[in-house]
């Protein structure tokens, strides 16, 4: 049985074989996590697919006389293999999403020794915050964006069409929207990372606020869902996140500069005096 991967310190040294052995152990952990989460997701695939269908309107066709629902929305398939492949794909995406923290932790554990301890703490906090923001983005997409966007899309000019929802395309759209909104919620982490590396600064972000707003709106336009409802619902959090990123950059930039100055002072005191 392979040993669990050992976390190296910044000062530790290791041979190429030891690094490869650590990488192999971490890959085994990730594959094991994916296998477990896939098994669980596949066992609950019906519940997952049902959850994906909740943003759909309650009724597809209603009686003009009684208002009673005559036909509900139901996903359709067009090939013998499509039901299996759709359920397999849904389970795979759910497994990857559930195992994502393990994947991120193992990647970080492998590359962390390359960073100094002070930087390790900063990056670990950013990764933790990014994971929380990703989950928050998925929740926002599921409970706010999709319930508003999907009824608008399937009801648009519905009197002119016999609306049929293909399972693969509908679930793909829902999954892509969830992931896309989760990714755009990483905006503060990306901005803070660039500020930490010195590529951006709080002052530069303030000066170019209008350009940032235009870019945020442009990103919302090219995200899944070209209808105005989805675009607006995706643009609003992007603009809020961008503005929040500016003020977070102001706060953390001052803090990081103070920490860098303190570290430089400590190094100067610890350095031996010149003869």
Image (spheres, rainbow, N blue to C red):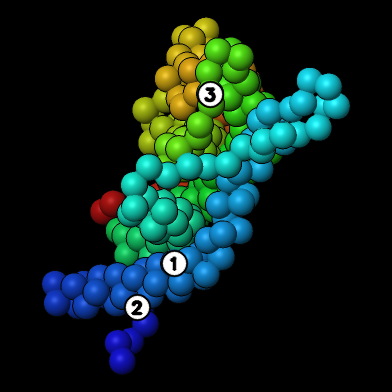
Above or below for 249 versus 226: below
Residue 243 found in image quarter: top right
Q: CA distance from mark 3 to mark 2?
A: 56 Å
Q: Tell which circle, 3 or 1, labels the residue nearer the N-terminal end.
A: 1
Query: Neighbour class for label 2 at 10 Å: few (<14), some, many (≥20)?
Result: some
Residue 81: where, in percent of width, then height?
33, 54
The residue beneath circle 1 is 38
Q: Residue furthest right?
A: 66
Q: Is residue 255 visible?
A: no
Rendered view: 13 above or below 228: below
Q: Secondary structure at mark 1?
A: helix
- The residue indicated by pointer 3 is 162
Residue at the spot 24% in from the left edge and 74% down from the top edge = 24
Q: Nearer the viewer, residue 260 or 116?
A: 116
* Disc 2, SS: loop
Q: Circle 2 sits on which residue?
A: 5
């Amino acid at each position: 049985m392979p040993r669990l991967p050992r976390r190296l310190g910044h000062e530790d040294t290791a041979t190429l074989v030891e690094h490869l052995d650590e990488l192999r152990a971490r890959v085994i952990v990730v594959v094991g996590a994916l296998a477990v989460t896939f098994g669980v997701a596949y066992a609950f695939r019906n519940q997952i697919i049902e959850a994906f269908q909740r943003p759909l309107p309650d009724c597809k066709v209603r009686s003009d006389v009684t208002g009673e629902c005559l036909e509900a929305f139901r996903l359709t398939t067009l090939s013998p293999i499509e039901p299996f492949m759709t359920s397999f794909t849904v389970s795979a995406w759910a497994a990857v999403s559930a195992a994502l923290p393990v994947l991120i932790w193992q990647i970080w554990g492998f590359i962390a020794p390359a960073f100094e301890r002070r930087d390790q703490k900063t990056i670990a906090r950013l990764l933790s915050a990014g994971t929380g923001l990703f989950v928050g983005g998925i929740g926002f997409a599921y409970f706010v964006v999709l319930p508003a966007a999907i009824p608008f899309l399937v009801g648009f000019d519905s009197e002119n069409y016999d609306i049929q929802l293909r399972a693969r395309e509908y679930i793909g759209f829902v999954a892509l929207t969830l992931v896309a909104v989760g990714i755009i919620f990483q905006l503060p982490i990306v901005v803070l990372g660039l500020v930490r590396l010195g590529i951006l600064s709080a002052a530069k972000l303030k000066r170019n606020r209008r350009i940032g707003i235009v870019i945020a709106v442009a990103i919302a336009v090219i995200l899944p869902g070209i209808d105005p409802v989805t675009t607006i619902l995706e643009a609003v959090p992007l603009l809020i996140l961008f503005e929040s990123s500016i003020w977070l950059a102001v706060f953390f930039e001052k803090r990081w500069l103070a920490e860098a100055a303190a570290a430089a002072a400590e190094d100067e005191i610890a350095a031996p005096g010149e003869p």
